[in-house]
Amino acid sequence: MDLLTHYPALQTLGVVYLILVLKMVAVGSYTSMIRIRRGHYATAEDYALQGLTPPAGPDDDIERARRAHRNDLENILPFFGAALFYALTHPSLTMARIYFWGFCLARIVHSVAYLRQLQPHRTIAFTVGLLLMLMMVLSTLLSLL
Amino acid sequence: MDLLTHYPALQTLGVVYLILVLKMVAVGSYTSMIRIRRGHYATAEDYALQGLTPPAGPDDDIERARRAHRNDLENILPFFGAALFYALTHPSLTMARIYFWGFCLARIVHSVAYLRQLQPHRTIAFTVGLLLMLMMVLSTLLSLL
Amino acid sequence: MDLLTHYPALQTLGVVYLILVLKMVAVGSYTSMIRIRRGHYATAEDYALQGLTPPAGPDDDIERARRAHRNDLENILPFFGAALFYALTHPSLTMARIYFWGFCLARIVHSVAYLRQLQPHRTIAFTVGLLLMLMMVLSTLLSLL
């Protein structure tokens, strides 16, 4: 038996989740890129390594990228486990695609809007992703109970 | 073959994990609610959207809710993967229920105690959750090795 | 059917992931240990419980341990889901062991280097872990698509 053919929603989830992992890595790499370009690091040993002196305060763009990244941890990571159980309840493949791709798109828009300081786009994207996750969670709970 | 009937502990984990996802969403929504009520946001573009001026410093209750949320990420998310492997080792369903529901209850008490500033209740709930996770991890490692 | 024998890479992932969970718990416990030893806590209620007065500013070592812990959340947790899908694509067990154990070792070195302020060791360990994850993610995407 092969799990990915027995549970077709699992195959879709794999593609969507791996795209979201690449997206999270992109936000993290974006933070590192600003740090390097501006010579603005997190620790004393990083400044020592570069032969730089620490700046006075935090950098707005670095803090914004870190908040975008943390928001991903708060949403994408809980989504993964919830979607895994959803896929194991033999959902309709159409509904699974709507939840998974909808969430994926919402989180990509969220990151772009966060980093480009676009409001209310960021809040709308966040809310759409959260509502899709909540509907999926409730539907899975109904199947499991 | 159906995984959720073949591995009954997986079915229990699904219910427990989805409840914990809802709990994490509740902590995140609580943070947003205080932000909106007090007009205290994270970014300049949020203040611009609302036509507000940023306050002088951080808000104690918002920072507390953010720490409670981060503590969830540090504990509930690692627990999920560990519990998944535990469920795949065909554990006794009684032990699985003790670990899963015990952890779930401990984390709910932890959040309530954190937000209501109840000490030592918060530390006790944190410790109970962590010990249950560690016992489950060690028991799973013994089965896998 | 037993998943852990049908997917041998899953068995390896279980051992590696549980070791990484113990490593994350170790970083978290290290933070708590410094907090207790120095009487430097996160919230007013913690100081009240201990009968202590809050110090003036943040503690460098506590903030460093917290950043090391957060870096784990940003890397180990996304890795878990990606590795799970990788294991389900029936990879060569040799490649799976290289990815899993290589990532595990890189993340252990990263934590030690972070807490001991060793640079460029920390950055090298971070980069090795990230590259192994990215290669695994791309290889899995190719299998799934």
Image (cartoon, coloured by chain):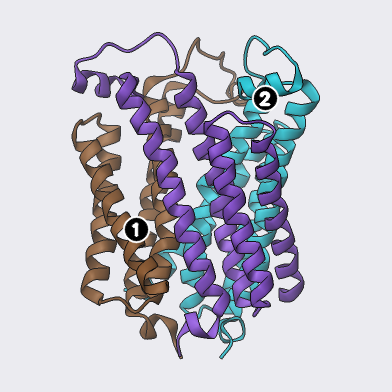
Chain colours: A cyan, B brown, C purple
> Label 2: few (<14), some or many (≥20) within 10 Å?
many
What chain letter is assigned to the residue under label 2? A
For mark 2, give the secondary structure.
Answer: helix
- Residue B54 place in picture, x, y as percent: 55, 14
Q: What residue type is labelled 2?
A: Asp
Q: Where the C terminus of chain B falls, by quadrant?
A: bottom left
| Residue type beneath disc 1 | Ile
Could you tell me if the residues under marks 1 and 2 are in contact, i.e. CB atoms within 8 Å?
A: no
Q: Which residue is tagged 2?
A: A46
On the image, numbered disc 1 is attached to which residue? B19
Residue occupying the point 42% across, 60% down: B80
The location of residue B17, given as percent across then percent down, is: 38, 61
Residue B48 in sight from this viewpoint = no
To which quarter of the image does residue A122 belong? Answer: top right
Q: Where is residue A121 in the image (x, y as percent from the top left)?
A: 67, 39
Q: Is residue C14 above or below residue A110?
A: below
Does residue C97 sit above or below C67 in this rendering?
below
